[in-house]
Image (cartoon, rainbow, N blue to C red):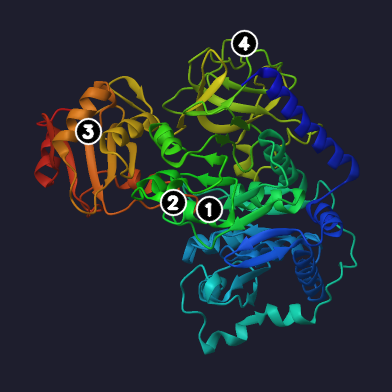
Amino acid sequence: MLPDRFVHRYLGVKWAASRFRKNNDSVPVLFSRLARAQPDRVLLRYNEEQWTAARIEEYSNRVANAFAAEGFKKGDTVALFMGNCPQYVCVWLGLSKIGVIIAFVNYNLRSQPLVHSLTVADCCAAVCSEDLAEAILEARGSCSKPLRVFQLRLGPAMGAGGGAGPGPEDAGLLEDLQALLDKAAPSAPACPPPGYRDMLLYIYTSGTTGMPKAAILPHSRYLFATMAALKSLRLRQSDVIYNPLPLYHTTGGNVGIGCALIAGITVVIRSKFSASAYFTDCAKYGCTVAQYIGEMCRYVLAVPPRPEDRQHRVRLMLGNGMRPTIWKTFVDRFNIPNVVELYGATEGNANIVNLDNTIGAVGFLPQSLPQAIYPVAIIKTNLETGEIIRSADGFCERCGVDEPGMFIGLISNRDPTREFHGYVDKEASKKKVIEDVFVKGDKYFLTGDILVMDELGYLYFKDRTGESFRWKGENVASAEVEAAVCAILGLRDVTVYGVEVPGAEGRAGMAAIVDPENSLDLEVLAKGIDKMLPTYARPIFLRKVAALEMTGTYKVKKYILQKEAFDLKLVKDPLFIRSGSTFVPFTNSELEDLRSGKIRL
């Protein structure tokens, strides 16, 4: 990508942000302006339903007035615990009109993780669909404060949880939101609208490394993410965006829905992602832009080829997590002119984008780009521990070309695009900030990700700190090993992590591979590993699993696998250890030989 194009588009985003700040704009203010100007414009499509700007405005106004009448006010937090549907958008938009903060709770959560999500955001109420009421009522009893539960009846096509719904004994614990909406006025609420810097949402981290954290998103952040997509991708109002992503996730609920609410672009939402329906849906709705996250593209590619693969008008796909090993195969099979890979954390300010189809790159930064324009950097890091390396003068050092290190972004409260709002948990927020990086007193956001930049300015994801491990005196990037194993095995789910071995320094590589049909050829795998990976990076242990447990955003919950390692008391799946030219079953006998030193790794 040409440097001047990058700078021009980024400055367009900064100009939009400064305009919003000057006008004290917020999401509901901008949406109401759009609804007045284009009331009949279709913004959301869901199954056969079409939701116009006027319909969304009226519904969200009813939500605002209903909750205001119930005593809710600016600064209160209400959890939204529903599957994807147009009402999901209307509910949070309506609550935002009276200054209520909305917590986007993953509807797949149950028991303690659900209690944690409700508690950490200090929720005083929750809105749920009928099929999820039982789960929220069960969690309510363990919450740290009273929780009012409003149930919204959506109909069988809009459910997400697959639950049976609450029983008669729970009827008195639920408040009928639909009845309140029927009585509420469709006009704008009487209270002043929220402003640019007011809090809008809590969006939770994916939970790949433990309990999810509630990231703070003010209106300023939501508008910045939306404008970044609109400006950098040159989206236009004639586009139709396919958005099968969870609406509780940033990419789906902010980047996708924001384009509808702020720019008037039609967005197609789906109750749940379906690999087989992905491109048939795109053809059905005339989509020109399609979104993805995590492993979605690999799942779509695993569907057997069929004529519908190319019977669509998609000109651009955007998201994050397209594996380099499938990138070319995917675009060739489905005839996708442009794949835009995004990089950035929900709460972060170090965001980059790959706009020109460079396979594997997560972003691009012109080498000539002044730091004053976009102050991000890759700094020297201990790849095993994740600890930042400082020079003798106490400051950090920038990495050279092709040198992996931590990606960071400058924090500045004078620039809305550089702010860091952190998490509700203040201690967790402190851990994501590093001070005195290049000069005394400066502050940067720590992404926790190891990136590398080539000589042209393209950036590539290497690993997450804590997921790299050291073996045989060498650093091993789990993402690189995963890519190699995937190339050998095709489209299987694979994850790689380091595990401690008795009597050995560092961590040995272990791979968990999905093999429900027990068809994995261990000799072929071993031969491929030997060909593609250096000795120190080759997995020593294997675990065959029926499926990998994923977060709601299609990321592997690796920390559970790493904790269980090859503990035969905890792991019921088949385990294997490398032996010669293949892998052999790992039993108590092999465990004893490992402990005694008979097996040397």
From the image, tell me which residue sits under label 3. Answer: 540
Give me the residue at 83% from left, 73% from top: 186
3D distance between C-alphas at marks 2 and 4: 61 Å
SS of the residue under disc 1 = helix
Residue 393's disc is 4
Give me the residue at 43% from left, 53% from top: 275
Q: Quadrant of the N terminus?
A: top right
Task: Tell which tag, 2 or 4, sits nearer the viewer.
Answer: 2
Disc 4 or 3, which lies upstream in sequence? Answer: 4
> Is residue 594 among the parts visible in the rendering?
no
Task: Tell which tag, 1 or 3, sits nearer the viewer.
Answer: 1
Disc 2 or 4, which lies upstream in sequence? Answer: 2
Residue 283's disc is 1
- Classify 10 Å Cα crowding around label 3: few (below 14), some (14-19), many (20 and above): some
Q: Foreground residue, 52 or 143?
A: 52
Q: Quadrant of the C terminus?
A: top left
> Is residue 78 among the parts visible in the rendering?
yes
3D distance between C-alphas at marks 4 and 1: 59 Å
Disc 1 or 3, which lies upstream in sequence? Answer: 1
Disc 4 or 1, which lies upstream in sequence? Answer: 1
The residue type indicated by label 4 comes to Asp
The location of residue 588, given as percent across then percent down, is 12, 46
From the image, tell me which residue sits under label 2. Answer: 308
- Classify 10 Å Cα crowding around label 4: few (below 14), some (14-19), many (20 and above): few
The residue type indicated by label 2 comes to Glu
The residue type indicated by label 1 comes to Ala
The residue type indicated by label 3 comes to Ile
